[in-house]
Image (cartoon, helix red, strand yellow):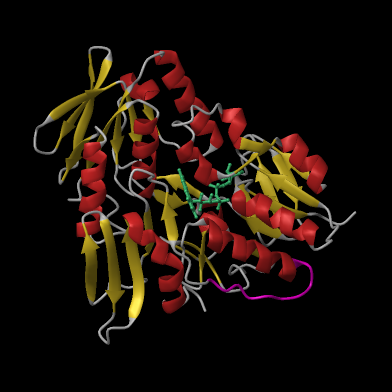
Amino acid sequence: MSAPLTIIGSGMAGIGLLKQLRALGVERPVTLITGDSGDDYSKPLLSTGFAKRLAPEKLAARSALEVAAQLGAVVRTHTRVGTVDPQEHCLHIGEERLAYGELVLATGAAPAVPFAIPEALAGRLFTINDLDDYRAFHAALEALARPARVAIIGAGLVGCEFANDLAAGGHAVSLVAPEQAPLPRLLPEPLGRALGEVFRDAGMTLYLGRGLERLEPAGGDVGLVLEDGQGLEADLVLVATGLRPRSELAREAGLEVSEAGIQVDRYLATSAPGVHALGDVACVAGINAMYVQPLQASAKALARTLAGTPTQVSYGAWPVLVKTPLLPVVALPPLQAPARWRIEGDGTDLVAFAEDQDERLIGFALTGACVKRKVELARATPPLLG
Ligand code: FAD
């Protein structure tokens, strides 16, 4: 039998590609290898589960066994691929050598933690980037059996969504970040400040404009010392300081890789014949968006290519809907820094237009009641990858 199409990674990109292949009627053998439980789940739901006190199993649409049965694939869970050899068309998993026909890297992105975690605090510090992480944090909250004091480090999309969700779940949230306002990569500062005000009104404590200096044990608590010397204590700490593409396998295999991920063209082809990449690990024609819509478009295009119809991927002007129900936020951040942000609106209902030198719209950000303008403004903004 010929070697199978092998997909590394069972996130939305890996399983999404498998679903698209089967939807096209492609029957070729597929092996899906994953370092985690292999459950089919929607990662965006991870930052909505604590408000509703959702048990981890409620977030999984189907188990790895069901994925294997329903999508007709061999699924290997809790299996870490050690190296890829594109010349020999094989992978190494420990001592095992596994031949592949074609290979797809869908290894996602890993949390980037920019400081050392003291060993004594290991069970108190968390990142949440997959269902297994959610399980671990959920268990730590349950073990406290009371509302927790949670310090969140980082005020980007992941930090802000968990802040809103945990506060809604009755926990006491502190948000620590070096920037002056939340969501610095998605919102111009006045809109970020509006979100910060709403968070404060909801009872959160915001420590902005200073980063974390160090972490230390403080009795039974975690002590956080900030750059200006201020201290705070927490039961648990959630680190949300960004994600980095997991491109080590590709780099070590000699594929073209940059800080932004594995370099692929619009056919999702890497620099090695027979090896493709998509999702958070892939930088497609210079863009690594790290959102669901681009990876879904990539999965559709790649499935067609693998089915015999070479298809380039296109990205539309897709805004990001930030899940902060305390203040709805929608943003389509421009690819390059805008010449200016033009801001309109009152209170927390704000529209920010990102404009280039010629006053053309290249992105936007919306808060509060103004999020209803997202469709109109997305239509007026150039596509991410047209
Ligand atoms: P991942 O889900 O990271 O999957 C990577 C897979 O690769 C895993 O199965 C892992 O085990 C496996 N793997 C890695 N290395 C190896 C190896 N060596 N061997 C074997 N397996 C390996 N996007 C939106 O558009 N809207 C949202 O509202 C939104 N909310 C989000 C909320 C949170 C809390 C987070 C963290 C992200 C959110 N995102 C959102 C981003 C979106 O979820 C991601 O872009 C997407 O899920 C990435 O999927 P992926 O399959 O590329 O990677």
**Residue ID at (27%, 84%):** 359
The kind of secondary structure the magenta stretch mainly shows is loop
**Residue ID at (57%, 60%):** 295
Magenta residues span 306-315
In this orientation, which residue lies closer to the viewer: 108 or 57? 57
Q: Residue 93: horizontal and vertical position, in percent?
A: 66, 41
Q: Residue 84: horizontal and vertical position, in percent?
A: 63, 53
- Where the N terminus falls, by quadrant? bottom right
**Residue ID at (61%, 60%):** 296
Q: Is residue 253 left or right of residue 235?
A: right
316 relative to 203, above or below: below
Q: Residue 114: horizontal and vertical position, in percent?
A: 30, 42
Q: Is residue 307 magenta?
A: yes
Please identify the quarter of the rendering in which residue 74 is found. top right
Say whether residue 101 is visible: no
Say whether residue 30 is visible: yes
